[in-house]
Amino acid sequence: MIDRELWSEVWQVLRSNRMRTLLTASGIFWGVFILIVMLGFGNGIQSGVNKSMAGYATNALYLWGQSTSKPWQGLPPGRLVRLNNADTEALESAVNGISTLAPRVRLANYRGRSDVVSGGKVTDAEISGDVPAFREVLPMTFKYGRFINPIDIAEKRKVVVIGERIHRDLFGEGVDPLGKQIQIRQISFTVVGVFKPRRYGSNRERMGSLVMTPLSTFQQVFNYGQQIGFYAMIPEPGLRSEDVGATMRQLLVQRHRVDPADHRAFGDWNSETEFLRIERLFTGIRAFIWTVGLATLLAGVLGVSNIMMIAIRERRREFGIRKSIGATPGSVLTMILAETATLVGVSGLMGLIAGLMALLVVDLITRPITKSVDAEVLFDTPTVDLKIALMAIFALGIASLLATLIPARHAMKIDPVEALRAE
């Protein structure tokens, strides 16, 4: 049952020492408030970064040929390594651990643009030759139609899948472009799909500017022969893309007669490495947040202990009178711990509520930007796991009670006669 007399007395004691109560509570309040706000901002930044990476496979490896820097087997340095369809067949048959292998070739250099024409309208686009497997590397949804399929590859069909911006510039928003023609270098292609990327900001604009044709068609109509620009590879579950990529590189080194020690002959980019690097970064950020937050809370705990020690010294006479009229040491201890629990609990909950309200205000202010698909903002809704927050406050309360035990035990041992004589 609730001891109303005890809690009424606790309230009177805290109210009678308002300045001391306020200063002690402020330390707890700000400790919890800072911890909640820092956790919310940390989670918001992490969520924003993860959202910016959404739409690409996070374990993909991209591999392409460059120029050799060392002579090998009588061949001079400076040779350009040109990947081809035979390399694709060799990789698919000889390298274990590949889940998806998507060869790709571009009409221009990296991010280079070419004109695309339809019905007298002209716009610029990134033209590429692709295979159906590339959809695993770049997940997408479709506003109209479909992606490239195996029949397109086998029959070398002159079909294209276009991005949102190309669709808007050439045909207009809301117009079904399926079956209509576009011209690339005076060669006509039929539109079979309009895809929508799952990217944000500048990347979304770039993906909306893509025009993708079947790889076999691209090689034939643009006179690329058997040439491949680069490979996008996703390993099988449980395997690292770096390990599978190393096996791919070894095979290509042998096929193109490259010095195994020539690290400039092939270039690569590993999204898995970048993703893990970001994960390690956020692990460090979370550790920093908890370190700062717990240090602030610890300062509050020490403040509570010091304040209670001072309060007990000031109330020696009161405790002496209590014990002289029959108060037990246990009742004195209970009263002191109840004061601490009330002080920490109320100020901690107020800090929690204030922190959550601050995060809500930040979310309301930033929501028009963070929720816009056209905004390149590495920040999302700041969130906090309420269970973790409540556990932090509970741990704070336990630590404060333990820190109060030292001065409380001193109060239990006060001799009534000595306490009255000292006054």
Image: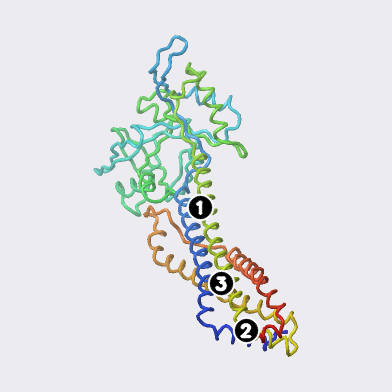
Residue highlighted by disc 3:
348
> Residue at point 57% right, 31% down?
244
> Residue at point 53% right, 78% down?
20
**In the depicted structure, whether residue 365 falls above or below residue 83:** below
Label 1 Cα neighbours within 10 Å, binned few <14 / some 14-19 / many ≥20: some
Q: Earlier in the sequence, mark 2 or mark 3?
A: 2
Q: Secondary structure at mark 1?
A: helix
C-alpha separation, residue under disc 2 versus residue under disc 1: 40 Å
Which of label 2 and label 1 is nearer to you?
Answer: 2
Q: Which of 420 and 11 lies nearest the eye of the viewer? A: 420
Please say if the residues under marks 1 and 3 sit with CB atoms less than 8 Å apart.
no
Query: Of the residues shown, which amino acid type is indicated by label 2?
Result: Val
C-alpha separation, residue under disc 2 versus residue under disc 3: 17 Å
Q: Which of 418 and 233 lies nearest the eye of the viewer? A: 418
| Number of marks | 3
Task: Determine which of the numbered discs, if any, sits on residue 285 in the image.
Answer: 1
Q: Earlier in the sequence, mark 2 or mark 1?
A: 2
Query: Of the residues shown, which amino acid type is indicated by label 1?
Result: Ile
Question: Residue 145: image x %, image y %?
Answer: 44, 46
Q: Which of 341 and 349 lies nearest the eye of the viewer? A: 341
Task: Determine which of the numbered discs, if any, sits on residue 28 in the image.
Answer: none
Task: Determine which of the numbered discs, if any, sits on residue 10 in the image.
Answer: 2
Q: Which of 50 and 103 lies nearest the eye of the viewer? A: 50
Question: Residue 127: image x %, image y %?
Answer: 36, 36
**In the depicted structure, whether residue 410 falls above or below residue 268:** below
Q: Earlier in the sequence, mark 1 or mark 3?
A: 1
